[in-house]
Image (tube, rainbow, N blue to C red):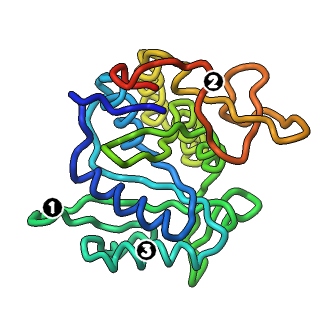
């Protein structure tokens, strides 16, 4: 497990958002992980004390779902809590209002799994006109390490290799000719390379019972196996004070 450093705490408002999301996910029995720039910030800034650049306030959460009904349940339960509202023009976006504050935080809920089409895309009901690519999210969840982002709050956060994969897939989706996207990826990879104890950020999936599986897209070492659920990296013996356990 990874631990946020005491001298690099996560923004309390972000913690409140993740607490609410985690409570809903547990109530519905759903698996999820933190993705996007906030996941990058949690790992690099708050766990390892590195500077990944300008901090983000957007929270992106990817959910493994079986149906669109589950997605609607997530939204409905979060909105019912009174601090989330639906964004008007973005179907998967909620806006979080901290107590006593006028500024809102963007919270994007990204569904994948049973709602995907064969092309690893989703199309949003009811008119099924808006499409989103979700390739790589299943592998990102399978290899996401557990991170204690605050006292009593332990969640899966996409690994650095998982973030790199999602960025490459997004670049491919938007068009490989985009030089700005390429520069963002190069900058991000340069920051990732500075992260200490790489083994703690890469966790090989366990082999299935009674056999072997092909390596996943996130496997960066020979012999990695696919698993159905995340687990801790073997042989990583770091203390919480170091940011890793």
Q: Residue 8, how many percent across, how many down?
A: 24, 30
Label 3: element kind: helix
Nearer mark to the viewer, of 2 and 3: 2
Tell me if mark 2 has few (under 14), some (14-19) or many (20+) residues whose alpha carbon lies within 10 angstroms of its own: few
Q: Name which residue lies at 29% across and 71% down.
A: 84
Q: Which residue is mark 1?
A: 103
| Location of mark 2 (residue) | 234
Query: Which residue lies most toward the left here?
Result: 100
Instruction: Count the numbered circles shown.
Output: 3
For image coordinates 48% across by 33% down, the residue present is 1
Of tags 2 and 1, the one toward the viewer is 2
Name which quarter of the figure residue 2 lies in: top left
Quadrant in which residue 161 is drawn: top right
- CB within 8 Å, label 3 to label 1: no
Contact between marks 2 and 3 (CB within 8 A): the answer is no
- The label nearer to you, 3 versus 1, is 3
User: Which residue is tagged 3?
Assistant: 75
Whole-angstrom CA distance, mark 2 to mark 1, is 42 Å
Q: Is residue 207 left or right of residue 11?
A: right
In the picture as drawn, the residue positioned furthest to the right comes out as: 210
């Amino acid at each position: 497990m990874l631990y946020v450093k005491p001298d690099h705490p996560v923004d309390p408002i972000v913690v409140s958002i993740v607490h609410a999301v985690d409570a809903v996910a547990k109530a519905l029995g759903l698996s999820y992980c933190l993705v996007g720039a906030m996941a990058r910030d949690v790992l690099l800034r708050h766990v390892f004390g590195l500077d990944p650049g300008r901090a983000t306030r957007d929270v992106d959460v990817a959910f493994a779902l079986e149906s669109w009904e589950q997605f609607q349940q997530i939204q409905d339960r979060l909105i019912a809590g009174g601090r989330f509202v639906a964004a008007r023009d973005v179907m998967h976006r909620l806006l979080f209002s901290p107590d006593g504050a006028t500024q809102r935080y963007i919270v994007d809920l990204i569904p994948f799994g049973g709602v995907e089409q064969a092309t690893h895309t989703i199309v949003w009901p009811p008119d099924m006109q808006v499409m989103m690519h979700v390739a790589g999210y299943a592998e990102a969840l399978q290899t996401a390490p557990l991170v204690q982002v605050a006292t009593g709050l332990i969640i899966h956060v996409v690994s650095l290799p998982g973030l790199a994969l999602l960025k490459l897939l997004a670049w491919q989706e938007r068009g490989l000719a985009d030089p700005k996207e390429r520069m963002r990826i190069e900058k991000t990879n340069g920051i990732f390379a500075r992260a200490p104890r790489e083994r703690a950020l890469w966790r090989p999936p366990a082999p299935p019972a009674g056999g072997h599986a092909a390596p996943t897209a996130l496997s960066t070492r020979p012999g990695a196996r696919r698993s159905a659920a995340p687990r801790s990296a073997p042989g990583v013996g770091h203390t919480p004070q170091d940011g890793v356990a």
